Image: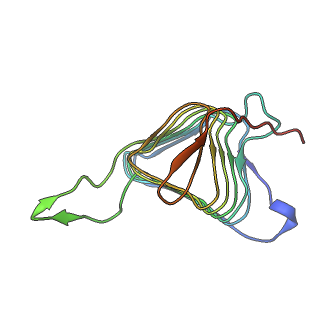
Amino acid sequence: MIIDSHLDTPGYISISIRRNGFLCVENDFVIGQNIKIFVNDNAKLLIKGRHIESTSGITCDSSIMCYKSITIGSDFLCSWNVYITDCDWHQIIKNGIYEKVNDNVVIGNHVWIASNVIISKGAFIGNDVIIGAYTKIGNKMVSDRSTIVGLEPKVISNSYIWKRDF
C-alpha cells in the first residue's frame, strides 16, 4: 500500500481493523489524504491493486466501511468523496420484519469511480465499468463495459472504456 498526498494537500489516513478482521492488498495500491478504511469483526476487505494500469487507488476524502465482505478488483481508480459499504450500519424494520442489514459488495477489474459516488450493500459491478459522478449503486448488478450514472442509476453506454495514460 502506498500512502501519498494528492496534490501535496495535508490530511490524514485512518485504517481500523477490528478483531479477526482481514485487509488484504495484493499489489500496489495508492491511498491519498483523508481516507478512512474500516474492517469490522470477522470481515474481509480484499483490494487487488495495480495490474496493468499505471496506478490503482483512491484519490482522497473517501471511506470504505466493511461489515462482512468487500472485494475491489485490480486497476481500480476512485475519485474524491466516494463511500463504499456493504452494510446499512443500523437495523431497518418494515411492518415488523427486519430487513437484511448487509450484503457483499464486489467491484470488478478496471473500474473507474468518479466523485461523490455511493456504492452500497448488494452492489455487484462488472469489469471495465465507468461510474459517473453523483451515482448511487446498491442491490444492483452492473454489467461489464457499462457506463452508469445517476441517483437512480441507468446504463448510458456499453461501448466506452477508460485508460490512464499518465
Location of residue 129 in the rendering, given as x and y in whole percent from the top left corner: 62, 38
Q: Measuring 87% from the left and 65% from the top, which residue is drawn there?
A: 8
Q: Is residue 109 above or below residue 80?
A: above
In this view, which residue lies farthest toward the front? 156
**The N terminus is located in which quarter?**
top right
Q: Horizontally, is 84 left or right of 29 in the view? A: left
Location of residue 89 in the rendering, given as x and y in whole percent from the top left corner: 35, 63
In this view, which residue lies farthest toward the right? 166
Q: Is residue 15 visible?
A: no
Q: Which quarter of the picture shows residue 33? A: bottom right
Location of residue 111 in the rendering, given as x and y in whole percent from the top left corner: 64, 39
Q: Horizontally, is 128 left or right of 64 in the view? A: right
Structure colour scheme: rainbow
- Closer to us: 102 or 30: 102
Q: Is residue 58 above or below residue 158?
A: below
Q: Is residue 52 visible?
A: yes
Q: Measuring 50% from the left and 60% from the top, which residue is drawn there?
A: 151
In this view, which residue lies farthest toward the bottom? 10
Q: Measuring 24% from the left and 64% from the top, which residue is drawn there?
A: 92
Q: Horizontally, is 59 left or right of 65 in the view? A: right
Location of residue 165 in the rendering, given as x and y in whole percent from the top left corner: 88, 38
- Closer to us: 6 or 97: 97
Q: Which quarter of the picture shows residue 157? A: top right
Q: Horizontally, is 61 left or right of 135 in the view? A: right
**The C terminus is located in which quarter?**
top right
Q: Measuring 80% from the left and 71% from the top, which residue is drawn there?
A: 10
In this view, which residue lies farthest toward the top? 52
- Closer to us: 68 or 94: 94
Q: How many marks?
A: 0
